[in-house]
Structures are given as C-alpha cells and as structure tokens.
Image (spheres, grey):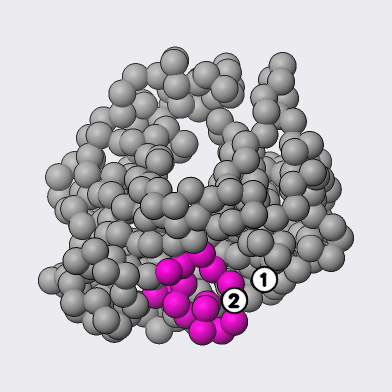
Amino acid sequence: MGSVKDLLVLEPPSEKKLGRGRFIFSDRYSVFDYGEMPDLIEDKGKAICIATSYFFEKLENLGIKTHYLGLVEEDKVKSLNDLKNPSNIMEFKMVRVIKPELKDGVYDYSIFKKEKENFLIPLEVIYRNSLPEGSSVFERLKEGSLKLQDLGLHSIPEKGAKLQKPIVDFSTKLEVNDRYLSYEEAKEISGFSKEEFEKIKNLILFIDEKIIEEGEKMGLINEDGKVEFAFDLEREFMVVDAVGTLDECRFTYNDIPVSKEIARIYYRNTDWYNEIVSAKKKNRFRWKEFIGNPPHLPKDLKNLISLIYKAYANELTKREWFDTPPLKDLLKRIKEILF
C-alpha cells in the first residue's frame, strides 16, 4: 500500500459499487516524502489505528460520512468500545483510486472532470491554526503562488503567528511528490463545482474544531493537520484514510512537538537531510536517486517516540491500551533531548 500501512482488498470497488478493504497499520514511518525509514517504532501501528478509529467514530456520530467500518479483532469487525485489545487493522469502505496521467512532466487531471462518483479526491486538504517559522505559507506568499485573499488574510502574518481564524490549504495527493496548490488550481484539478469547493472548506474547518477540542483535553495545541476525502456513490464527501493521529496532525505542548515532527527535527540536523534539499532542487521526480540511505534514529529517541504515540492513544480515548508514562512526562524528556 505505502510506506506506513498495507492494504488488504476484500471486495474491490467498481464504478457503481463501493468495495471493502482493510488497512494494516504498521510500525513503519516516513518523513520528507522519502518512504520507509530504517527504524520501526514499536506499537505505532496499533496506536495510530486506535486514534484514527476514535475520530472516525466521533465524526460518524456527528453526521459526517466516513469510510470507516470498524476495527478487526479475531477476524470480527468491532467498534472501539467492543475491542478487548489494541488492534492495528481497520476495515473500511473502498473507493476507486484514479491517478492523473503524467505527460511530458505535467500531470493531466482531466479524468476528474469526467468521473462523477466513487473515487478518491486527488487532494490533501490542510487546516492551519498557526504559522510556525519555516511554514511553506511564507515562501508561497512571497513568490505569488499563494494569495492573501485565498487565506482570508489582509496582511502578511508574522512567523509563529497564532491565527484568529484557521485557514484552509491544499496540496496534491497522487503525484510523485506533493506540491501545494492555489485555490484555483485545487478547484480545477479536482473537478469541484463552486458549491463543492466551499463545502469541503467548511467540512475541514468543522473537523479541525473537533480535533482542537480533543487536543485541549490533553493540554495539546492543534497547530495544523491534513484530511483526505473521497466521493461516495451519491457524490457526497466522505472522510477517508486516517484522521486526528500524530501522523496526520501537528500538535504542540508548551512549544514541544507532539507528532511525527519529532523525527523531522532530528533529521533536519543531519547531512542526509541536506542531500534531500539539494536533490529535490535538481530533479523533483527522481530526487531519491541522488541521495544516500537515511541514518537510524538514536535508540533513546526512537523509544520515546513509541511511548508518545501510545500515550496519545491512551489519553485520547481515556483507556489504557498501552503501559506508558503520562504524555506530559514524555514530552519533557523530548525537550531535554532535542532542545
């Protein structure tokens, strides 16, 4: 399936019928679009599966359509409340994945204007509640690929700014490397009507609010995150993939990262990361050919990351799935190592 989870197809989807599949969340992880990294994060797959299931069930109860069917235990599909032990397998409704065709270095998205239902929307929809230093937003505003009015802003924000209102951003989903999109291009390549485009922006902001509420219960600030969507058989939006996890969201606690950002911070101080930056400038499609293998994470840091994933799942669901110290204690140790 991908660098961090595998796919088991039980019933393949067709043009007029949803399929059925299972995600097997692994202990693998990925940063900087590289793909599978050299270490495994113990129990990460189970922790991610528990967390996303919690949010899928919450959204379903609030009337938001999702592809979620349940968690798998002893080959039975169960709700989170009925699960006896943590599972890394989630069953879901499958849609078609239609990929844009690459022609002479340019992706052709015309297929998404012809297809009407039952497919993965080729966008990652991003909410931003703050703009930390290094955010892509600043460079994109400077170069003109992003406009202030797209973000609902009247002036260039300061670095590290907490936004009065969250902003919605878009990137590609099905290209070799994700790239950010203007609102016009996001609407164009997805085949959205004007009404659909407004609806998906409102929907991501609603989901953002729910993630904010859950994070605040743990003392976490929801800085930004991404959500993926599909069209169902009635061309209604359906939340898919995973949502509200430490891989999909960037949380902080007293300015300490609580997400995959921990690994990114470590790797940004390596020569390997500098190779990536140079290689992507050289060739955005084949950049991996120009870099070496990534170094391993230090053992102590890897173990701490594992515990953080597990503590988040425990405290989010208010159930002790894993034996871990409190999340706040773990983050204090992260601060000592990285800052």
**151, 18: nearer the viewer:** 18
Residue 67 within the segment the image draws in magenta: yes
Q: What stretch is highlighted in magenta?
A: 54-69
Q: Nearer the viewer, mark 2 or mark 1?
A: 2
Residue 238 visible from this viewpoint = yes
Q: Which residue is drawn at 79% across and 36% down?
A: 110
Inspect the image, locate mark 2, and give the three-letter code of the amino acid beneath it: Ile
212 in relation to 91, above or below: below
Q: Evaluate if marks 2 and 1 touch, with contact meaning CB atoms under 8 Å apart.
A: yes
The CA distance from mark 2 to mark 1 is 9 Å
Inspect the image, locate mark 1, and give the three-letter code of the amino acid beneath it: Leu
Q: Would you call the spot at circle 2 few (<14 residues within 10 Å), some (14-19), or many (20 or more)?
A: some
**32, 271: nearer the viewer:** 32
Q: Which residue is drawn at 51% across and 64% down?
A: 67
Q: Which residue is drawn at 30% across and 83% down?
A: 81
Residue 50 is labelled as none
Q: Which residue is drawn at 36% across and 48% down?
A: 8
Which structural element holds mark 1?
helix
Quadrant in the picture for residue 105: top right
Q: How many labels does the image show?
A: 2
Residue 284 in picture, x, y percent from top left: 58, 24
Residue labelled with disc 1: 203
Residue 84 in picture, x, y percent from top left: 18, 77
Residue labelled with disc 2: 64
